[in-house]
Amino acid sequence: MVLDTLSPDRKPILFTGTPDQNDGLNVKFGLGRQQREVVGPGCWQPNNNYDINQDCMVAACKRWIFDSIPTSEITSESSFSDWYTTKEGVNIEIPGVLPLVDGTFDSKEFFPIDGQGFGNEGRDHNYHFTTEAHVKFTYEPGQKFTFRGDDDLWIFVNNKLALDLGGLHQPLAGTIDFDKLGLTPGQQYDMDIFHAERQTDASNFRVQTNITCFVPVEIIK
């Protein structure tokens, strides 16, 4: 769904090209590349069936990226670029802090901006928001980062896509094993986190990591 590197201003870029092949299997146009990493209810897998419109015939599954048949989720590369950009009438940036403490942060009601921005618009919570965080961490062998949620999450480490849970789906989990990323112990690296909440009745958000210190990074705009 996104390219495997960030834009010069540290934002994800929508992947709109032809999907890769997987062991000779031609992946249908519009499904992105993450099918090799993510499986579960609502996600595309090689043995899924499709209807004539190339929609996944799996509960709660929707197209993962923009294709030749526009959808209400992502209508263009331009609309996707609005997700993490302040734009009048579309997005309002709201600075905040998500403190990490001992234990696991696990919530089915992750609504950090209730009553802010455009407001709750007559609902119990302020749905349909994005989350963006930029931090540095010092790599040590054995580090892992696990996220579980019901909508998009992309994590970039050292400007490379390390975890891809993009798309509308039921709650899914993914884990980054930093030992597999070719990092140098004791060296500091950037981690860029992008999340989107696109559900209408819940907001699942679970984070677990053994990284002991994250240093916030201010992105100059």
Image (cartoon, rainbow, N blue to C red):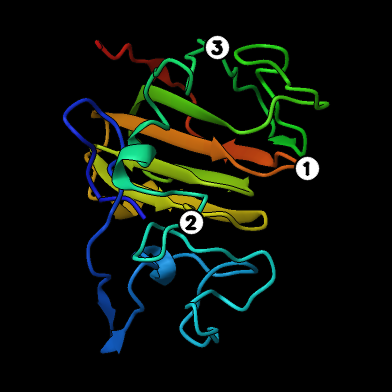
Residue at the location (40% across, 41% down)? 155
Give the position of the C terminus as an image quadrant: top left
155 lies above or below 58: above
Tell me whether the residue at label 3 lies in contact with that at label 2, contact meaning CB atoms closer than 8 angstroms: no
Give the position of the N terminus as an image quadrant: bottom left
User: How dense is the environment of label 3, judged by Cα within 10 Å: few (below 14), some, or many (20 and up)?
Assistant: few
Please name the amino acid that badge 3 sits on: Gly
Quadrant in which residue 133 is drawn:
top left
Residue placed under numbered mark 2 in the picture: 71
Please name the amino acid that badge 2 sits on: Thr
Q: Secondary structure at mark 3?
A: loop
Drawn side of residue 57 relative to residue 126, left or right: left
147 lies above or below 57: above
Residue placed under numbered mark 1 in the picture: 201
Marks 3, 2: nearer the viewer: 2
Drawn side of residue 81 relative to residue 52, left or right: left
User: How dense is the environment of label 2, judged by Cα within 10 Å: few (below 14), some, or many (20 and up)?
Assistant: some
* Cα–Cα span, label 2 and label 1: 20 Å
Please name the amino acid that badge 1 sits on: Asp
Q: Which mark is residue 96?
A: 3
Residue 195 in picture, x, y percent from top left:
50, 37
Residue at the location (72% across, 37% down)? 106
User: How dense is the environment of label 1, judged by Cα within 10 Å: few (below 14), some, or many (20 and up)?
Assistant: few
Residue 207 in picture, x, y percent from top left:
60, 38
Mark closest to the chain's N terminus, 3 or 2 = 2
Mark closest to the chain's N terminus, 3 or 1 = 3
Residue 187 in picture, x, y percent from top left:
23, 29
Quadrant in which residue 118 is drawn:
top right
